[in-house]
């Protein structure tokens, strides 16, 4: 996903623009449900979660956004996200065929499904909770909090961008 705070949404190519719209709809749904998330959250595994957030009970939620069938079917590394969250969702554009998500390769007993556009979202299948070990959850929450604080400070003072990236 591309950060539209740097590039205006209207100037993005169609696919990144649609992915950004899906992220916005999901963020609105989550906010109404007291889940606060960040886009493009780097993980220790080297992957980057499209959305990563924390609910009111301190549980970590990750959403992998897909806007094309080829991207959905071609992502063989998505299971890497499962080690970093208590709940995992697929976040899909409304036009995307969701039938493949019911197959065993997509672990339907482990993954929820959200459909979203730029205005709102709906949970079609709730994500079951698979609790992280307490030390792992603490580490993920701290990393997420530090990333959120860093983004806020750099947004206020871009001079700080080169500091503390270790």
Image: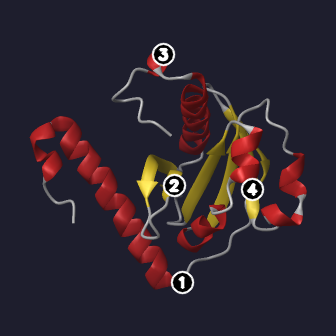
C-alpha span from label 3 to label 4:
30 Å
Count neighbours of disc 2 (C-alpha within 10 A) and say few if under 14, some if 14 to 19, many if 20 or more: many
Count neighbours of disc 4 (C-alpha within 10 A) and say few if under 14, some if 14 to 19, many if 20 or more: many
Q: Nearer the viewer, residue 146 or 18?
A: 18
Residue 43 drawn at (x, y percent): 44, 64
Q: Which secondary structure, mark 2?
A: strand
Name the residue located 83 percent from the left edge and 53 percent from the top edge.
Answer: 101
Q: Which residue is mark 4?
A: 112
Q: Which quadrant of the structure image shows residue 131?
A: bottom right
For the C terminus, the image quarter is: bottom left
Q: Which mark is residue 133?
A: 1
Name the residue located 42 percent from the left edge and 76 percent from the top edge.
Answer: 138
Q: Which residue is mark 2?
A: 49
Q: Are marks 2 and 3 in contact (CB under 8 Å)?
A: no
State whether residue 69 is above or below residue 60. above
Q: Is residue 38 left or right of residue 13?
A: left
C-alpha span from label 4 to label 1:
20 Å
Q: Which secondary structure, mark 4?
A: strand
Name the residue located 55 percent from the left edge and 40 percent from the top edge.
Answer: 27
Which is in the foreground here, disc 1 or disc 2? Answer: 2
Q: Nearer the viewer, residue 133 or 57?
A: 133
Question: In the rendered image, is residue 108 in sight?
Answer: no
């Amino acid at each position: 996903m591309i950060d539209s705070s740097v590039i205006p949404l209207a100037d993005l190519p169609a696919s990144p623009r649609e992915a950004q719209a899906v992220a916005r709809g999901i963020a609105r749904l989550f906010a109404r449900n007291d889940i606060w998330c960040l886009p493009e959250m780097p993980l220790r595994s080297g992957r980057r979660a499209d959305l990563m957030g924390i609910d009111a009970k301190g549980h970590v939620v990750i959403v992998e956004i897909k806007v094309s069938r080829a991207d959905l079917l071609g992502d063989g590394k998505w299971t890497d996200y499962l080690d970093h969250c208590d709940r995992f969702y697929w976040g899909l554009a409304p036009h995307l065929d969701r039938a493949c998500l019911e197959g065993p390769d997509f672990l339907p007993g482990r993954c929820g499904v959200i459909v979203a556009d730029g205005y709102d979202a709906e949970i079609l299948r709730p994500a079951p909770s698979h609790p992280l070990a307490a030390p792992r959850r603490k580490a993920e929450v701290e990393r997420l909090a530090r990333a959120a604080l860093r983004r806020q400070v750099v947004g206020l003072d871009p001079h700080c961008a080169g500091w503390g990236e270790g």
